[in-house]
């Protein structure tokens, strides 16, 4: 049976969270197919890196270990991945929809002349009947993603030009340990025989990366609090909900001024402008300075004990109540109902 | 420094940022007719970067290349109004239904016809799909390096171009030799406005197909000023392989589409009861908003 493959990102000997999430998603697909889960990882100082990867149920890991492979650059990583994909010939390949994955995956898809679906939110296995060929294709990847500004969900398939590739954004898939004691076969990639000088013509001159920068702009879900949250303790519920939903926490100017939350999380005209899929406004009245920074959210939930709060006019759901009562209930019912 | 030859890839897209309730048909499919078309925002940033390089390197020539239906000739005119030197349109019904792989194949066929070039610029992604795939796929097919998410060109000299890349958690400054392909991030400089003079000069620019329905005045203008006629390339003109274009050249196919119900401004008013909150959470999960 052909394998499911995941391209893992690594920096400073730490495998990226998105990659572990993909391994979990890949394992679920592999189990449905009854096929092995394979991963590839390229970086430097990777001796023993399989310790971080094996518990996710990886059967085989290709390791490209060289100083020249970190930080990521397109051409050397693409050259190694191409070789491995040709050798391994997987059925499905998954990448993070990160600045690395979105740079690499399309280049590989072009190289291998295969299909690639970006920013999938659901991955599944299913069949498809092709009328023209009067043939049923079994066990295809269903790459499901929102399209047209989030107004539709499209199920994208690819039955004839393999592998089937997909990217997934961080936080979309759940990271789950499969088996703490799982054993992974490690294959050292002969980096020097594959890479040539021409792969290194693009040079990184400077690099400034913030280890844990707040990234409100790209967060698909934002849980945001205002003065009406009432206390720093109540704000903890917002943080918990955001974490649970794979989102970020934000706040209004009033919440920042009250010391509930840091300045770099302020949303609005003088803070960050955001366009998330879901914006939860907790105890925010909705002054224009605030709504200017979030009114393009696809869906807005307002939690407020003032029925006339201006933000309610923008909202898709208005919940009358105290933040300290409503948010813990949201956490409870999400945990009970999420798949 | 020697002048450069730049090709800007630009796309006309439905304005998905302003999707109204009538943008969906009752059967849940997209009502394209109800969506206005716009110059893809990131591609406008790419155009500005090209114009900025032209300001810095005198003699540089910019060609704008688009693929799309006849209506997409607006993209070429818009390019002229802002200062590009040439515009070319790839337009043929047989290109329709292309995914990113077939699109990049087609664009690259067009780029080969425009060769030699030093720099290919395009937006990071288009708002109708947000895939960000066509740029890197073109770079692969051209066998040239790619520099994605460019925010600013810091330096250009005979041998290399040095650019700042905007990444999720920071920035990177990289140098690349020529020729290379860059995709331009929306955080880069916004595009300059149209020149009134250029608008006067190019407002009658038309493709051959558009000329078929044009009036006498425009036809005679095109005779006097051949530069007004926008080249329009077909499958044969770019020597494209029918197997690699349009639907047949596209590995990804849409199996099914499920519409997401709009709740436009019709808010659901809930209490803080357990029943109400559980119902809402279930709805959000069902509509893939969370989960």
Image (spheres, grey):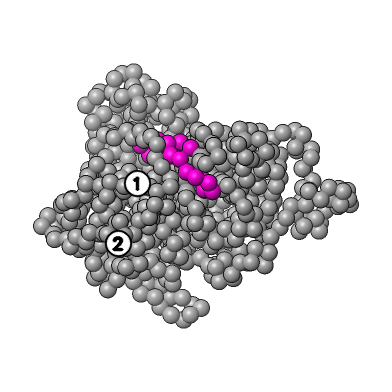
Which residue lies most toward the bottom here?
A134
In percent of width and height, residue A323 lies at 29, 31
Q: Which mark is residue A117?
A: none
The answer to whether one can see residue A192 in this image is yes
- Observer-nearest of B64 and A198: A198
In percent of width and height, residue A239 lies at 26, 34
Q: Is residue A179 left or right of residue A205?
A: left
Residue located beneath label 1 in the image:
A72
Local packing at callout 2 (Cα closer than 10 Å; few below 14, some 14-19, many 20+) is many
Local packing at callout 1 (Cα closer than 10 Å; few below 14, some 14-19, many 20+) is some
Q: Nearer the viewer, mark 1 or mark 2?
A: 1
Examine the residues drawn in magenta and state their main secondary structure.
Answer: strand
- Observer-nearest of B157 and A319: B157
Instruction: Give the structural element (helix, strand or loop) at label 1.
Output: loop
In the rendered image, residue B170 lying in the magenta stretch gets the answer yes
Residue drawn at 34 percent across, 18 percent down: A257
User: What is the C-alpha distance between the residues marked 1 and 2?
Assistant: 19 Å
- Magenta range is B162-184
Which residue lies most toward the left here?
A181
Q: Vertical placement of B231 versus A252: above or below? A: below
Residue drawn at 51 percent across, 39 percent down: B161
Q: Quadrant of residue A328?
A: top left
- Observer-nearest of A98 and A266: A98
Residue drawn at 47 percent across, 50 percent down: B145
Q: Quadrant of residue B53?
A: top right
Q: Vertical placement of A326 versus A55: above or below? A: above
In percent of width and height, residue B13 lies at 59, 49
| Disc 2: host chain | A
Q: Where does the N terminus of chain B fall, quadrant-wise?
A: top right
Check chain identity for marks 1 and 2: say if they share one. Answer: yes
Residue located beneath label 2 in the image:
A5
Q: Vertical placement of B15 versus A141: above or below? A: above
């Amino acid at each position: 049976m052909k394998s499911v493959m995941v391209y893992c990102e690594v920096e400073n000997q730490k495998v990226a969270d998105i990659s572990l999430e993909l391994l979990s998603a890949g394992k679920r697909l592999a189990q449905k197919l009854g096929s092995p889960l394979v991963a590839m990882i390229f970086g430097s100082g990777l001796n023993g890196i399989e310790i971080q990867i094996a518990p996710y149920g990886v059967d085989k890991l290709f390791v490209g270990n060289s100083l020249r492979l970190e930080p990521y650059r397109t051409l050397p990583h693409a050259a190694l991945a191409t070789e491995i994909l040709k050798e391994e010939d997987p059925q499905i390949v998954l990448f993070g929809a990160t600045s690395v994955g979105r740079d690499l995956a399309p280049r590989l898809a072009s190289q291998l002349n295969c299909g690639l679906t970006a920013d999938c939110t659901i991955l599944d296995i299913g069949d498809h009947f092709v009328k023209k060929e009067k043939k049923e294709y079994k066990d295809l990847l269903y790459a499901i993603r929102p399209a047209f500004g989030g107004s539709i969900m499209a199920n994208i398939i690819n039955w004839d030009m393999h592998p089937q590739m997909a990217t997934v954004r961080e936080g979309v898939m759940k990271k789950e340990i499969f088996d703490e004691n799982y054993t992974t076969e490690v294959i050292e990639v002969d980096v020097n025989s594959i890479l040539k000088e021409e792969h290194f013509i693009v040079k990184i001159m400077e690099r400034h990366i913030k280890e844990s920068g707040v990234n409100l702009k790209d967060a698909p879900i934002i849980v945001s609090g205002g003065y009406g949250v009432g206390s720093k303790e109540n704000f903890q519920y917002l943080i918990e909900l955001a974490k649970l939903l794979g989102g970020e926490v934000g706040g209004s100017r009033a919440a920042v001024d009250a010391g509930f939350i840091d300045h770099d999380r302020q949303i609005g005209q003088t803070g960050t402008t955001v366009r998330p899929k879901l914006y939860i406004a907790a105890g925010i009245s909705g002054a224009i300075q605030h709504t200017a920074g979030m009114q393009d959210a696809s869906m807005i939930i307002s939690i407020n004990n003032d029925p006339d709060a201006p933000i309610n006019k923008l909202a898709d759901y208005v919940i009358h109540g105290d933040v300290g009562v409503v948010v813990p209930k949201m956490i409870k019912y999400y945990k009970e109902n999420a798949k | 420094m020697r002048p450069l030859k730049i090709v800007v890839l630009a796309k006309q897209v439905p304005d998905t940022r302003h999707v109204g309730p009538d943008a969906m048909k009752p059967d849940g499919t997209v009502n394209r007719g109800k969506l206005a078309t716009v110059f893809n925002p990131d591609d406008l940033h790419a155009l500005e970067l090209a114009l900025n390089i032209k300001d810095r390197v005198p003699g540089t020539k910019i060609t704008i290349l688009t693929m799309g239906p006849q209506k997409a000739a607006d993209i070429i005119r818009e390019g002229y109004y802002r200062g590009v030197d040439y515009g070319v349109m790839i337009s043929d019904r047989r290109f329709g239904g292309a995914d990113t792989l077939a699109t990049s194949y087609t664009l690259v066929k067009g780029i080969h016809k425009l060769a030699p070039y030093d720099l290919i610029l395009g937006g990071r992604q288009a708002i109708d799909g947000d895939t960000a795939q066509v740029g890197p796929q073109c770079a692969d097919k051209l066998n040239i390096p790619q520099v994605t998410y460019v925010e600013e060109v810091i330096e250009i000299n005979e041998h290399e171009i040095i650019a700042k890349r905007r990444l999720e958690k920071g920035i990177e400054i990289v140098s690349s030799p020529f020729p290379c392909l860059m995709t331009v991030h929306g955080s880069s400089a916004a595009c300059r406005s149209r020149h009134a003079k250029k608008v006067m000069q190019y407002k009658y620019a038309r493709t051959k197909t558009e000329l078929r329905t044009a009036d006498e005045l425009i036809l005679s203008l095109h005779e006097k000023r051949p530069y007004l006629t926008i080249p329009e390339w077909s499958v044969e003109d770019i020597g494209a392989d029918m197997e690699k274009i349009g639907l047949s050249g596209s590995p990804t196919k849409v199996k099914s589409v499920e519409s997401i119900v709009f709740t436009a401004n019709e808010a659901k008013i809930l209490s803080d009861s357990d029943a109400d909150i559980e119902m809402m959470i279930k709805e959000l999960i069902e509509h893939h908003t969370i989960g």
